Amino acid sequence: MSRREVAPGLVAVGLAVAAFAQDQRPAATPPAAVPPATVRTVDGRSFAGHVTVDEQGTVRVATPGGDQTLQFADLESIDLSAAVAARKPIQGHTVRLRSGQELLARALGGTAAAGDQPALLRLTTAFAGDVDLPLRNVAAIRFQRADGIAAATFDADIAEPNATQDFLYVVRNNKAQRIGVSVEAIVGELLKFDLHGEASDFGIDGLAAIVFAKNTGFAPDRQKRPRAGLQLAAGGSIEGKLLAFTDTTCRLRLDEGAELTIPGADVRRITVASDKLTWLSELQPKVEQTPAFDRVWPWTVDRSPVGPGIQLGGNAYAHGLEMVPKTRLCYDLAGKYDLFEAMIGIDDRGGPQAHAVLRVFVDGAPAFESEPMTLGKAPASVRLNLQKARTLVLEADFGKNFDLGDLCVFADARVVQQ
């Protein structure tokens, strides 16, 4: 299928760069007028002030009482939402990387492989200008206004890509059709590929999506901790190694090697992943369960069995564990941590008769037992000294009602090194 053979039957999906909305980003506020950020550490301290992070990972917080000097690995987060308002999401092409990240691009281009240089995909982003990534690190591209895609088929290809064949989704008669090819590169506004041994090309403005084969690329090695997750003002997030941060500029290196320079006005929050703080949702426990009504009910990570996220006491939590009694989660901590912390209670979506008891065991010994937790009861804060314990067990036990609405929550459950 050459470009000449397929082009007459395709309906363009209106992806021309000139049609993109103009960036509505407000002008950056001068640094002196920016409200202070809130810096939280893994050991529970909090500071408000203007923040800088240098290339050595030294954090300085200018507070009214004087400067505080910390290490980036000691932080839980830098909250900039008082200075950076959320904005309407910017429309564009969605590029899914093999590392699992998704980047939004206002325009796409690229270059072919040459010598030792692999084929590159160029993303023109709304927050960091042009970014070049190896095409072999890309898992899929969904082009803007790809309305003709059958979502179930596309999602299935993403979840289980073909081992060796790339799939193009092209729009014909307002319906996307899937074609198996071998993609070589995107050069300018042309996709170059091989079809049944014949070199072909096709304009990317006629594509709805591309899903790359499983074995023709790979995810890059993850950079070591501490890592930074950036929540962007226009929605979405990106993750990598923080190189530097000021009121006006944030520099981040992706695992794919690209270094991004992002205006400070585009970053609302920075979360820190370091060895000093580990969310229990990142660890794999040994699970022990007692059936309720002859059925074992699922326990969930960073969400509820009844829906997305964790909702407790009117607040939403991005991290945590949720379980139906009786469930015991047993974690091997290898003697690395000093503290365990969590907020506990019944998820706000639990049943009206919810009644359960939550317990924590450290090295096999009882360390905490809650009062009976019921729907609407104020969450309780748990903070326990681990003293380099080897094991930690979280337990949700039946209360008096044996109700299946006992959605027991350990929100923000984490272990901390001091």
Image: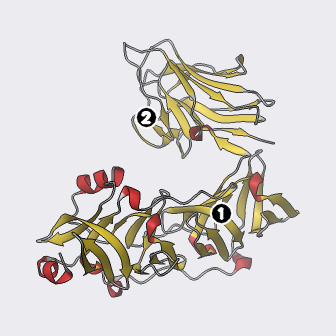
Estimate the x, y position of residue 361 in percent, counting from the top left: 68, 21
Label 2 environment density (alpha carbons within 10 Å; few <14, some 14–19, many ≥20): some
Front-lying residue, 234 or 179: 179
> Which label's residue is closer to the chain start, 2 or 1?
1
Would residue 165 appear left or right of 418 to someone viewing this image? left
Front-lying residue, 265 or 58: 58
User: For the C terminus, which image quadrant?
Assistant: top right
Kind of residue sitting beneath label 2: Arg
How far separated are the C-alphas under marks 2 and 1?
37 Å
User: For the N terminus, which image quadrant?
Assistant: bottom left
Estimate the x, y position of residue 303 in percent, counting from the top left: 47, 40
Whether residue 292 is situated above or below residue 415 in the rendered picture: above
Label 2 belongs to which residue?
Answer: 349
Label 2: which secondary element: loop
Picture quadrant where residue 343 is located: top right
Residue 241, numbered label? 1
Kind of residue sitting beneath label 1: Lys
Picture quadrant where residue 377 is located: top right
